[in-house]
Image (cartoon, rainbow, N blue to C red):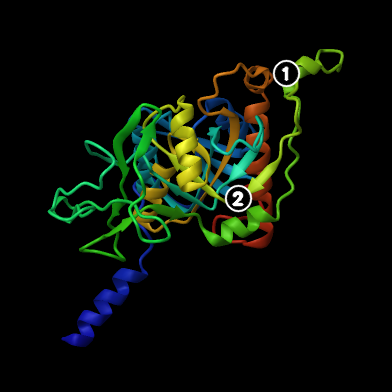
Amino acid sequence: MACVLMLIATSATAQPRRCLSDCTPRIGIVSAFGAEADLLIAQATSKRTLTVNGKRFTTGVLRGNRVVIVLSGVSMVNAALVTQQLIDHFRIERLVMSGIAGGINPAHHVGDVLVPDRWAMPMEVYWSVDASPPMACGTPGDLSCLSMKLATGVDGKTLPPFTLPGGPTGLFMRESNLLNSANAPQGEFRFDYPVDPVMLQVARGLTPPLGRCGPRAKSASGDVDPKQCVREQPQFVVGGRGVSGTAFLANPHYRAYLFEQLQAETVDMETAALAHVAASNGVPYIAFRSLSDLAGASEFNTDVGVLFVSGLAESNEAAVTLAFLEAWRKQHGSPSAIATTKP
């Protein structure tokens, strides 16, 4: 009987992940910005479209890789929903997230493309009354009776709550609860979601052609309008922490808090949700983000308008995604990487 059970278990674990619609191994590309998704789809060959609950998934071949491209829409909920749909309906080997994000680290400039090595959700909070660690379960900082855990620093101490100039808000960062087949049934608390180290290593070797002027900066005669170019040459930066949340961040005090407490580089409203779903399903992921502005900056920045009006935001993001896919196919050929245009 033991041998029979072992054979059953071995057979079960050897089976590929289920797929409801298309079982061809693919790299899933989730875009939070419609114009960039359009550019990627335009570059793909052997395209087919599948609609799931109104959401359009486009399969095809991109830089020699079998892919499926989908637009998530803004927000953590939309990103989580479309990522799970992607994994359920297709055989996704790896996930790539790309789009626009706000800057946290003031050293970066509009147009820079960042590739954080981990993502977190600091807006998952416990809202207390003051700056004292909450005592919901009888001991300062202990939330175990609520099935929660406060976020801690490298010293193991509870991270301080967000404070405004007028005083503390009582907003303490929490860790998220992650349940998957590897840690079931108890699950685990997690603050950071590391990106896949193999994909990150490929990204470190990239030298993508980032433009300073978008494609719409050129006139019909080929002349470039300097007013449609950002002032600083965009840089490609790999490493550091990215953060995501349900709020559109336009508060300089909270931006400074994230930078001081977490050394965050960038903030968006999708990537960490995708990372959570990826970790829940055991799918490796990476994210590329083009900076649109310094989150919560009060002064007007003409580069922000240039980034969108000239098409620079989507063209630079697409350039990075395409460069990554090209390098991935060359360095890590897999069932999703092919030499022909067979879909």
Tag of residue 104: none
Neighbour class for label 1 at 10 Å: few (<14), some, many (≥20)?
some
Residue, disc 2: 65
Q: Could you tell me which residue is drawn at 67 percent across and 17 percent down?
A: 302
Nearer to us in this view, 148 or 281: 148
Whether residue 255 is visible to the viewer of this picture, yes or no, is yes
Front: mark 2 or 1: 1
- Name the residue furthest top: 220
Residue at x 23%, y 87% (from the top left corner): 3
Mark 1 residue element: helix
- The quarter of the rendered structure image containing the N terminus is bottom left
Cα separation between marks 2 and 1 = 29 Å
Q: Amino acid at mark 1?
A: Arg
Tell me: residue 297, above or below residue 31.
Answer: above
Q: Vertical placement of 105 versus 329: above or below?
A: above
Q: Which residue is mark 1?
A: 216
The number of callouts visible is 2
Instruction: Say what secondary structure mark 2 lies in.
Output: strand
**Left-right relation of 160 to 177:** right
Q: Earlier in the sequence, mark 2 or mark 1?
A: 2
User: Where does the image place residue 147, in percent across and percent down from the top left?
Assistant: 18, 53
> Relative to 174, is 184 above or below?
below
| Apparent side of residue 85 relative to residue 115 in the rendered image (left or right) | left
Image coordinates for residue 321, horizontal then vertical, percent: 62, 42
Q: Amino acid at mark 2?
A: Asn
Work out whether residue 306 or residue 259 is closer to the camera in this orientation and state it.
259
Image position, residue 113 (x, y; %): 64, 39
* Residue at the extreme front: 166
